[in-house]
Amino acid sequence: VSGRALVAEVPRPAAAAAPYGQVLDALDTWIGRAARLFPGVARAEPDLRAALAQVRARGERLEAPLFVLLAGGTGAGKSTLLNALAGGEPIAATSAIRPTTTALTCYYHLESELAIPGELLDGARRAPHRRAALRDKVILDAPDFDSSVRENEARHRRALAAADLVVLVATPEKYAGADLFALLEEHRRGRSFVFVLNRLDQGVAPEVAADFRRELERAGFAQPTVLVLSALAALRAKRGDPEPGPQGDFPRLEALIEEELTRARAREIKRLNLDELVLRLLERAAEHVPPDLADRVARWRLSAAAIAGEAHAAVGESLARGVVEDEALAREVRGRIATGYGGLFGFYQALHWAVRALGGRGLAGAAVGRVLAPPQGGSAAGEEPLRAPPPGEDPLPGAVLLAADRIDDIAVELAFARPTPPLDAASALRLVDRARAAARAELTAALDRAHAPASGSRRVESFLYNAPPLAVLGYALVTWCLALARGEIIGASWFLAAGLAAVTLLATAGMLADRIAARRAARVVDSLARAAREIAEREVQGPLMARLAEAAGEVQGAAKALADLREEAARLRRPGSISSPPATA
Amino acid sequence: MLDSAAAAPAEPGLASPAAALEAALVALRPLEATDYRAAALATIEECRRIARLKLGPPAPAPPLAVVAGGTNVGKTTVANALSGAVLGRPTPLARGTKAAVLYVSQAAADAFRRGAFLPGYERRDLGEPAEANEEALAGTLLVLPHPPGAAALDAIALADSPDIDSVFGKNRRVAWDLLYAADALVFVASEEKYNDEVCVRFLAQAARHGKRIFAVLNKSAAPEAAEDFRRQVVPRATAGAPPDAPPAEVFTIPWLGPGAQAGAAFAPVRAALAGLAEDGEEAVRRARAGAARALEEELRPALETLRREAELLEHYRAEAREIAAAAARSYRGSLATLPILEFDRVLRLLADALRVPVLDDFYARLREAGRPIGGFVRRALGLADPQDGLKRRIAARDQQDVAAARVILGEALGAVRRLADRYPPDLANALRAALLPAAAAERLHDLDGPYAASLGREADAWTDGVLRDLHAKLRTHRALVAVIKTLKGILRAGAAATAIALTGHLGLEDLAIAPAIDLLVKTGVEAGIDRAYFARKRDAFYDARAAVFERAVLERVEALALARLGGTRPEAIAHAAEAARALALAEGRGR
């Protein structure tokens, strides 16, 4: 967007007052919201709010008189020019002492006094008049910005901020000053400019005007109007000096201010300035929102997924290890599977495992769940920033907390804020506890399943294990009965032998069943470990990523809101503004 | 002519004080991303330029008067009028002169053609006067020599400077460099510009640097402005001059209309310059002393800033390292319950050492023979090999240990990352900028394979050490070993004899007595060893492990926060301050 010099334009019908009211209100809300999300906006918040207030004030002044500021370095002839424009009256003091003017001079129509903002009139020299031609204009003569009286610069800037139209007065000595162009660069947007090259009375070479124009173009002003004049000669002429000397373009300037700047035209200028100011303000706000936000959020999500994955893997590993490495648990699972048979064999197995349990190597019900309980020694929530988990303390909530912190750190680095509130120790503990509880529930269910002799194959197995000893015992009994029927008595040794044979068969079957149970138990433990990892993924990675998604949504929402505002502003701006192509929205 | 300046030469074999200062200044580097960096760097660069341009080894050359001022005030016109030659073509366009033009007698021209004067500038003789206005020659030194006696001002060199305030930035650099090199300043102002901030600052700086000041109000029409210039502006601006400097002289050139030459009005200025020529040595000496003094003064706040920065950085480094040390300590604390499974190997060695020759060999053979059967049974029952079990348990223990270490490491890195928040805002930004980006720092959290491997190495080294130690002990306490072996043998043989006596024959059950006795002795010895000997070795094991972690955490803290941290070493700052002081003293000595 380039700076804009005043050129003749077709006046357009007036729009409603404060046309950007809604946009500015929305921006106000947005700044508050985005300050929490983008560190850049937070840093720039005071500046943005100040600029917003300024734009609001300008928006409200659309119907007020046009503020024409005579700006320029010390000794450029601003005050002389004001006096000439005021018809030769000594409104502003002029002298050869540098700097002459140290306060703002305000030349205004008596009736528009109320329309001048108080902060401008404060400490200013007031010069009211009753000239109809200048009815809707307030002409301000500012102190310089470049003399060694540094307070003048602040006054100059204050006046510039309020000006709608800047008549920049330069001289052959001062037209190429570095500080002048720095000031123009800072203020060229949101103001219209007329450039004056004064001191025609002392001679202004034509190439100087051309050079000035070139510098202005280089500084971003498209086709700047440079009026070469002599304020001194004009003043002399106004005061009736018969030989005032060449006035140059002064009549043109006077005509521009008195006649061309009709009410409608003034309004038009203000509206164009306002368009530019709003646009500039929104641009400034947008500077603090990373343009590649979607990319950044995607990068954040990727990194976060990796970190959360690491955390859930840590929790999952811990849970799975709790399952896999606990020998008591493995024995219990094996025992439960091995005792899940009916009949004589079932009785034998129950007895066998009960005896093993007596030896401390069998079913140890208390072991179940212990492995999945957090280690004793207190919770992980601590106040100290750097503290090792004391011996025996649960490291898992710490790992989750750390992952959340690292995810938040990456967000900050990608230039949007960490999600609020940060994950606290209690929440981390809750996440881990939930994962543990789910794993315990899974374990209990698996153990119940292991014990239930429900399936068909278990029934067949049960039958196969029971059949041989029962057959032996049955055979012994039948043989004994037949012998009894024959009148023979078979001694107890017969039963002893049969019993021994049956027990041997039972023991053999038991060994076989135990081996099979061991295999099955290993599978159950494996599946439990797998389930534990899945649970950890669900209970740890899930919430971490959900937290991220929420923050990412908010960040992207804010960026979208600003983009919408810019689109809305582009739609509202007057078509045909010079400074940028028409909005395509 | 410059004997007095040459009387204070640098010690032979040493670099001149100015060169030493320049070298010292190069070492000053404020932190990136601080608010004060740009200003401090600019100051340091200006000081470096002053040292180079003004304070190099004294060379015999006439005093240099530079005509300088704002754009379009008429510098070239004044220079032409003073020299009586055409140094440049005055132009109505602002920032007309772009090159530095030097008017000097033929005899002295060589001194200025050499690199000692305005080093780094391209130099050539002035051909056409209009050359000075060529943009392509910006930053060039154009020399216009004149034959002796041809010029009114033979004994000085006169330079026409580009402007100090226009949008053409290169001009500013040339003007300031010329000012640094000058012994006297012909400050040209106009009625419009005599109180411009930029011009007054330039004048004030020249006065502070001890240059003779000739202030010329050009194109003067209003007597009250001339009066203001003479009575207010110039005295105020030159108030900072060294106390022994002659007061600034003020001249007024009247405005006679466009293009008119006020030739006669320049006579007093020319006379004053002639006075400068007479007093040349003194002016040169004073300008050198003034420059050295001003340099020291200007450098002081920048050095103070750097000193404060260095202190804070030192503090920050210490804090970061303290965090690493605290992490290592807390890790060491967490090790108290770590099982030392490597002890099993030690015990096996012990068992081997306490073997009773014939009896144990018999059992060992038996076990050897039974091993395949045992293996078969184990496989059939799905039991794990006890050797595998130990390895697995060690691996699992290490894994758990690494997981705990990772949490401590993560907390330490997080604490270091947040450390910057506790520093003043401008420095905090710099500290944050020096942090490794979070995404890149991710890998620092990884206690990867190499770390676990070094844990394993430490454990192996510990085991080897303990084994060696035990070997040595067993060798030195042969008697004790023999006693234990004998006791073991007696116990075993006695028990077997008793069993045979009771049952009347040697049965299988009697064979089982030996392992039982073995177990008894082993348990007793192990308990004794554990209490008396191993407790002392335990700490060594944990310390070695903690040392591995400490190395890892320190290395990672360095990589995260300290590796990219710049800043200046305190010695470099002190060195620069000393060099500036030495230079000021050396230059002031001639007084």
Image (cartoon, grey):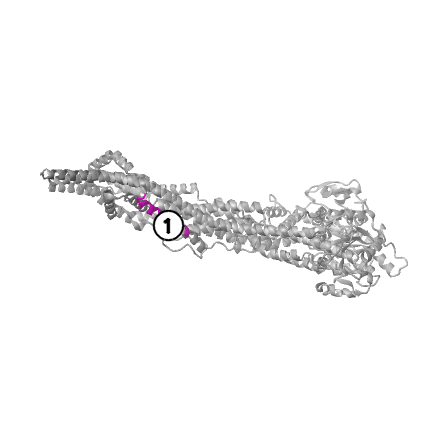
Query: Is B342 on the left-hand or right-hand side of B22?
Result: left
**Left or right: A256 with respect to A242?**
left
Question: Is A128 located above or below residue A179 in the figure?
Answer: below
Q: Is residue B353 magenta?
A: no
SS class, disc 1: helix
x then y, percent, for residue B400 = 38, 46
Residue A562 showing in the rendered view: yes
- Residue type indicated by callout 1: Ala
Q: Where in the figure is residue A567, as x and y percent of width and height?
A: 65, 50
Residue lying at 88% horizontally and 55% vertically, measured from the top left: A245
In-front residue for pair B453/A549: A549
A450 in magenta: yes
Instruction: Give x and y (percent) for residue B328.
Output: 42, 50
Q: Residue furthest left?
A: A487
Indicate left or right for B307 with A244 as reference: left
The chain letter for the residue carrying disc 1 is A
Q: Which secondary structure type mostly characterizes the magenta part of the structure?
A: helix
| Residue depicted at 29% across the width and 41% down the height | A459
Q: Write down the region rendered in magenta.
A: A434-454
Pick the residue in front: A305 or B141. Answer: A305
Along the viewing direction, whichever of B147 and B426 lies nearer the viewer: B426
Q: Nearer the viewer, residue A492 or A113?
A: A492
User: Which residue is at the far right?
Assistant: A242
| Residue named by callout 1 | A441
**Residue A65: x percent and y percent?**
76, 60
Quarter occupied by residue A503:
top left
